[in-house]
Image: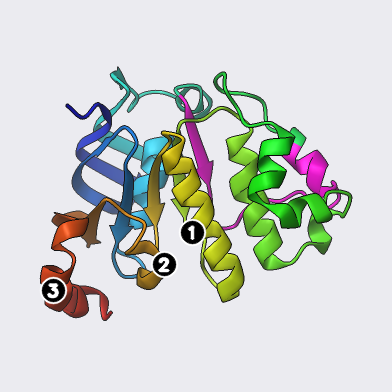
Amino acid sequence: MSTELLRLNAVHAWYGESHILHGVDLTVNQGEVVTLLGRNGAGRTTTLKAIMGLVGRRSGSIMINGTEAVALSPHRIAHLGLGYCPEERGIFASLSCEENLLLPPPVASGGMGLDEIYAMFPNLKERRASPGGRLSGGEQQMLAVARILRTGARLLLLDEISEGLAPVIVQALGRAIRTLRGKGLTIVMVEQNFRFAAPLADRFYVIEHGQVIETFGAGELEAKQSMLHEVLGV
């Protein structure tokens, strides 16, 4: 039996007066990689932010490992074992790569040590003394992902981690996701790069106009190609 780690039921979210999510329902089981697909503006990033409590207002139910989180503040949600990697990365430019890695406080036990991080991302070991602002875009993205692995989070929310990166960096991030899944971590990804997401994910949710319009497993991917082409243009 799969263990349900995350469940959203009838989740609505607003930024000010703008009503972005219109009743999102989804579930994520422990150890899964789940990808949220959709066009820009469909509500995928807002879904991640709603899970973390980073929207102006939200309603519905967000169950995280059996705890209702819809009324909790972001720091309390993080301490339920969540790690969020935002699209803008949030690297501290004046701190070294290693100082960036050491900065986040733990949210749970079992965070990865520096040796484990450097084994997964050798580029970061080479650049560990370099200021964050001097890292390449790909190195900054690796650092943003690695930083949340230090915290002990077991449910990772990754927003467009492959966007605008060189193919060799994208491949390294794909290997890292496979490794993390092998360690039993659970991952929810927002991805525009369908070729990157397709071989990694166990299940897919397609979001349009703030609602889930389709959900399917990796084994159904080929049968869903025409629908995905119509909705996503892929």
Residue 227 image label: 3
Q: CA distance from mark 3 to mark 1?
A: 25 Å
Spot occupied by residue 94 in the image (x, y as percentages of width and height): 86, 50
Query: What segment is highlighted magenta in the picture?
Result: 81-101
The three-letter code of the residue at mark 1 reads: Gly
Please rate how many residues cluster around mark 1, counting C-alpha atoms within 10 Å: few if below 14, some from 14 to 19, many from 20: some
Q: Nearer the viewer, mark 2 or mark 3?
A: 2
Residue appearing at x 76%, y 34% in the figure: 102
Q: Are marks 1 and 2 in contact (CB under 8 Å)?
A: yes
- Is 190 magenta? The answer is no
Q: Is residue 133 left or right of residue 145?
A: right
Please rate how many residues cluster around mark 3, counting C-alpha atoms within 10 Å: few if below 14, some from 14 to 19, many from 20: few
Q: Dot 1 lies on which element?
A: helix
Q: CA distance from mark 1 to mark 2?
A: 7 Å
172 up-or-down from 19: above or below = below
Q: Is residue 147 left or right of residue 19?
A: right
Q: Which residue is mark 2?
A: 196
Q: Which residue is mark 1?
A: 174
Picture quadrant where residue 205 is located: bottom left
206 up-or-down from 230: above or below = above
Residue 16 visible in the snapshot:
no
Quarter of the picture holding the N terminus: top left
Q: Is residue 99 left or right of residue 111?
A: right
Spot occupied by residue 231 in the image (x, y as percentages of width and height): 20, 74
Spot occupied by residue 150 in the image (x, y as percentages of width and height): 64, 33
Please rate how many residues cluster around mark 2, counting C-alpha atoms within 10 Å: few if below 14, some from 14 to 19, many from 20: some
The three-letter code of the residue at mark 3 reads: Met
Q: Dot 3 lies on which element?
A: helix
Residue 207 visible in the snapshot:
yes
The three-letter code of the residue at mark 2 reads: Phe
Outermost residue toward the right in this view: 129
